[in-house]
Image (spheres, grey):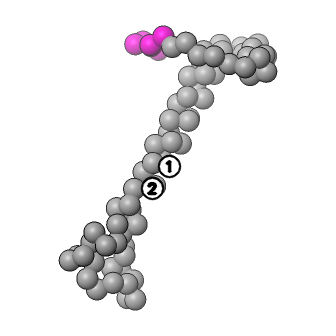
Amino acid sequence: MSNLKRKQIYLDEESDRALKMLAIETKISESEHIRKAAAKYIVKQKTAIAEKDPIREIIGLCDNPNGPTDASIHQDRYL
């Protein structure tokens, strides 16, 4: 856990209370729970962004026999 950066966050009372209880019940610090949650959220968001990449939509487009025959020439139309 070296090279940790300090961040200040604000939680509503319900989330703060739930986080405190979770930390007590699991014997894992509130900070560690926040770090784990942030790591999962970042992975999920990166995946969602990658899936929205328009280039992914043309992958395999020409493998379909009914697909366009001019995709290599007019690829911008398909993005």
Q: Quadrant of the C terminus?
A: bottom left
Left or right of 15? Residue 53 is left
Main secondary structure of the magenta stretch? loop
63 above or below 46? below
Relative horizontal placement of residue 57, taking residue 16 as reference (left or right): left
Tell me if mark 2 has few (under 14), some (14-19) or many (20+) residues whose alpha carbon lies within 10 angstroms of its own.
few
Q: Position of residue 22 (x, y in %)?
A: 75, 20
Number of on-image labels: 2
Examine the rendered structure and indicate whether residue 18 appears above or below residue 66. above
Disc 2 and disc 1 in contact, CB within 8 angstroms: yes
Range covered by the magenta-colored residues: 1-6
Identify the residue position indicated by label 2 in the image. 52
**Residue placed furthest toward the bottom:** 66
Q: Amino acid at mark 2?
A: Lys
Q: Amino acid at mark 1?
A: Ala
**Which residue is identified by label 1?**
48
On screen, residue 74 above or below 18: below
Regarding residue 22, the answer to whether it shows in the image is no
Q: Nearer the viewer, residue 2 or 41?
A: 41
